[in-house]
Amino acid sequence: MLALLARREYSLKELETRLLEQQYPADQVQEALQWANAKCFQSQARFGVSLARRRAATYGNRAILAELAQHEVAHNPFEGDCFGSHQSAALSGSPEIQPELQRVVSWLNRVYGGGLQALTSSELAQVLPSSEALLALKAKAYRALAARGFEFSNIEQGWKQFIAPESDN
């Protein structure tokens, strides 16, 4: 079990499944999981934050919270201090997860190259000659972001910042 935890954070459900697949008796698996949790080798809160950080660049809060629910993790890494006070001090220097709106804008810049931001309105008219083309691009971006679990209000604001960054609202 320690070899697994040395590679990355695991939820209790994942560890239990992995150990049972390796034919360990169920009572020994439960005892090992309790020991690992008591000795802080495994933490559901730490797993939640780790998963959120790994997924944050490409997935919205809804999708990340749904995945955490599949792992039976009750901690919400997007709200307040999900660590115990003794763990918060140790992790205070770690990078925080960006707000979802910033992640939407970053995703749009990464996927669509950010090229639209640098163009003036006349240059934009040449690249996207009709409002239909712009609407098609907007619809495609909205569908992709919604499928990744981003909130609609953040998609709308992020699109506005992506198209016209000088009017950040």
Image (cartoon, grey):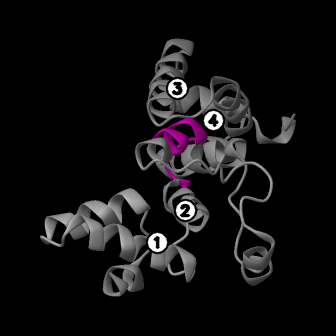
Q: Residues within 10 Å of mark 4 (few under 14, many from 20)?
A: few
Q: Residue furthest left?
A: 23
Q: Which residue is mark 1?
A: 34
Q: Residue furthest front?
A: 27
Q: Is residue 45 above or below residue 29?
A: above
Q: Mark 3 against mark 1, which lies toward the viewer?
A: 1
Q: In terms of secondary structure, where does tag 4 sit?
A: helix
Question: Who is closer to the viewer here, 117 or 78?
Answer: 78
Q: Residues within 10 Å of mark 1 (few under 14, many from 20)?
A: some
Judging from the image, what secondary structure is the residue with disc 3 in? helix
Residue 79 percent across, percent down from the top left: 75, 48
Residue 142 - label: 3
Tag 4: amino acid: Glu
Between disc 2 and disc 3, the foreground one is 2
* Mark 4 vs mark 1, CA separation in Å: 62 Å
Where does the image place residue 96, in percent across and percent down from the top left? 72, 65
Instruction: Kindly tell me whether residue 2 is visible in this rendering.
Output: yes
In magenta, the rendered stretch is 56-66
> Residue 35, image x and y in percent?
47, 79
